[in-house]
Image (tube, helix red, strand yellow):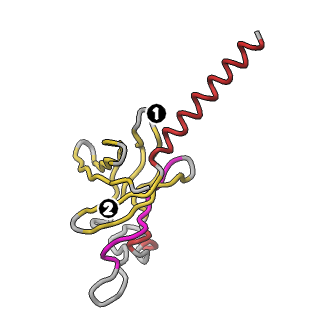
Amino acid sequence: MTKRFFLTISFLVACLCAAFAQADKIVGEYQCVHDGVDSRIKIFKHEDGYRAQCTWVSNLKKEDGTLRRDVKNPDPAKRKITNDKIVLIDKVKYDGVDTWKDGKIYDPTRGRYFTVTLTFKDEKTLAVRGSVAFIGKSVYWKKLK
């Protein structure tokens, strides 16, 4: 009886560890080229979900040498954030079926938030789909690390 109990507990712990490892598969650094702008994005655990934050953009400086900022952000307090520090995705959660969802993605070119779903197309390609109702657009991020 005791041996069977410990085997059952060991099996459950192993299953939970595997599920957590699968959820963390999204953590890492990515490259995205969108509308001619190359950027690097870091996805990391944050609170009870995952967050994606820009860490580098190819066009950080304007022609006059000043830094580009998030001037279209609907929150006036965030309009002074430089483009290489913008939080792009927040509060996504792993659904247990190789998909992360229930969060929001921010489009700094329009200053708008959308529902987001993240899935791996292959081991190194993350499909990032932002949508409103049934209308959406996907971009692909290449995993670097």
* Amino acid type, residue under disc 1 in the picture: Gly
The C terminus sits in image quarter = bottom left
Seen from this angle, which residue lies furthest right?
2
Residue bounds of the magenta highlight:
49-60
Q: Residue at x 61, y 29 (%)?
A: 14
The image quarter containing residue 122 is top left
Where does residue 137 sit, x and y in percent of width and height?
Answer: 23, 50
In the depicted structure, whether residue 121 falls above or below residue 140: above
Q: Residue at x 30, y 83 (%)?
A: 62
Label 2 crowd (10 A; few <14 / some 14-19 / many >=20):
some
Label 1 crowd (10 A; few <14 / some 14-19 / many >=20):
few
Seen from this angle, which residue lies furthest top?
1
Give the mark nearer the N terminus: 2 vs 1: 1
* Residue wearing tag 2: 107
Where does residue 93 sit, x and y in percent of width and height?
Answer: 47, 43
* In-front residue for pair 8/131: 8
Compared across the picture, whether 136 is left or right of 65 comes to left
In the depicted structure, whether residue 63 falls above or below residue 119: below
* Residue wearing tag 1: 96
